[in-house]
Image (tube, rainbow, N blue to C red):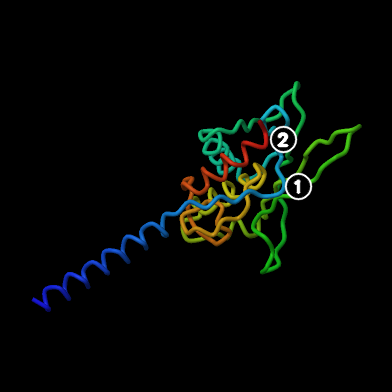
Amino acid sequence: MKKAKRLVAIFSAFVFMLSAFAVSAFAVTVRVGPGWLVDNGGHMDWTGGTRYQADFDFAVRVWNNHRFVIRRVTFWTSADVQVFDWFDDHPRSYTAFVDLTRRLIGNGGINTGRMGFNTFQMDRLSPSPLQRRRMVALHELGHTLGLADNLGIQNVMNPADTTVNVLSPSDRASADAAWQRFR
């Protein structure tokens, strides 16, 4: 009888630990950054272009499918972000970056910025270069939308070198929190 109680206790402890791990492994963490490039109308209008346009367009579709309105500049809109490529062959150079600035106009301000892809680093991504380029575009575009880095392993906003190109629950919750600033 003691042996049976001990086995039940061990099994119960194992189930409890397993359930605690499952909850912590899938816990949603919200991370919102201090800056964003979404205008007062709730849009982010971009101009310029990149050698990785297909990857950038993929990232735009993913974020737009969640709730954002990211669109190319037209005659009637002004640019919130300039997309471009640059070359830096230093081994520790960035793969991509986002530069957020604020121009003061009158009593208000306009958020503007740049989103750049380092062609030296982007062309050398491996393995799975397509997935990794898409992840870089998704990640950097997330910063323009106001999301901060988020270390969850399945997060697009994880700054680590991954191939994740689908928004996680944490990415979606962070995007929802960032979106509240635009409303």
Q: Amino acid at mark 2?
A: Thr
Answer few, some or many: residues within 10 Å of disc 2's Cα (few below 14, many 20 plus, some between 14 and 19): some
Residue 76 vertical position relative to residue 69 in the rendered view, above or below:
above
| Mark 1 or 2, nearer chain start | 2
Q: Going by the image, does 87 lie left or right of 58?
A: right
Q: Secondary structure at mark 1?
A: strand
* Image quadrant in which you'd find residue 88: bottom right
Task: Name the residue rendered at 67%, 51% in the picture.
Answer: 117
Task: Name the residue rendered at 88%, 38% in the picture.
Answer: 104
Residue 161 vertical position relative to residue 55 in the rendered view, above or below:
below
Query: Label 1: which residue?
Result: 100
Q: Secondary structure at mark 2?
A: strand
Instruction: Point out the image quarter for the C terminus.
Output: top right
- In the image, 25 versus 76, the foreground residue is 25
Question: Residue 26, how many percent across, how many down?
Answer: 41, 54
Question: Residue 13, how many percent across, how many down?
Answer: 27, 69
Answer few, some or many: residues within 10 Å of disc 1's Cα (few below 14, many 20 plus, some between 14 and 19): some
Q: Going by the image, does 64 lie left or right of 118?
A: left
Q: Going by the image, does 174 lie left or right of 80?
A: left
Task: Name the residue rendered at 56%, 41% in the picture.
Answer: 59
State the separation of the CA atoms marked 1 and 2. Answer: 15 Å
Residue found at the far right of this picture:
106
- In the image, 19 versus 5, the foreground residue is 5
Q: Amino acid at mark 1?
A: Leu
Q: Nearer the viewer, mark 1 or mark 2?
A: 1
Question: Residue 64, how many percent across, how many down?
Answer: 55, 33
Question: Residue 23, how many percent across, how many down?
Answer: 38, 57
Task: Name the residue rendered at 75%, 25% in the picture.
Answer: 77
Query: Label 2: which residue?
Result: 47
- In the image, 127 versus 145, the foreground residue is 145
